[in-house]
Amino acid sequence: MSLTQEQIEKLSKNLSKISVDNEKIAWDVNWILDYIELLNEVDKTWIEATVSVVENRDSLILDEEKNKTITREELLACSNQKVIANQIAITNIMK
């Protein structure tokens, strides 16, 4: 399978921003298409179809929404910084 210069120009114009002035682009695109065609010739009948690379889908951890409400005081208590007027106090960074 190879593309004509006209097909490459159409791809260049409509689908991508590659320059069609370069002969190497045409050679590269044709080389890629030839490689894909070669891969299509490989016997794949023994390969099992997959939809996921994860073998055991049950082992995935499901996200669980927690309904617990955390108060402002509980969140502020998690901070190692000093808390003043329900705000975390930081050092002056504008010195």
Image (tube, grey):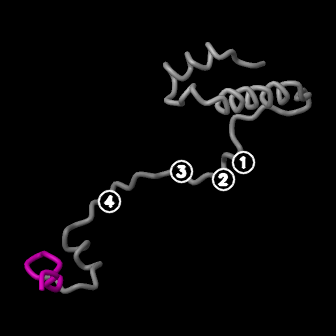
Mark 4 or 2, nearer chain start:
2
Give the Cα separation between the discs numbered 2 and 1.
Answer: 6 Å
The residue carrying pointer 1 sits among few (fewer than 14), some (14 to 19) or many (20 or more) residues within 10 Å by Cα, namely: few
Residue in the picture at 74% in, 46% down:
55
Question: Where is mark 2, residue-wise?
Answer: 59
Element at label 3: loop
Tag 4–tag 1 contact (CB < 8 Å): no
Element at label 1: loop
| Amino acid on which the number 1 mark rests in the picture | Asn
Tag 2–tag 1 contact (CB < 8 Å): yes
To which quarter of the image does residue 31 belong?
Answer: top right
Question: Where is mark 4, residue-wise?
Answer: 68
Element at label 2: helix
Foreground residue among 45 and 17: 17
Residue 66 x/y as whole percent: 38, 55
Question: Where is mark 3, residue-wise?
Answer: 62
Give the Cα separation between the discs numbered 4 and 2.
Answer: 26 Å
Residue 36 x/y as whole percent: 77, 28
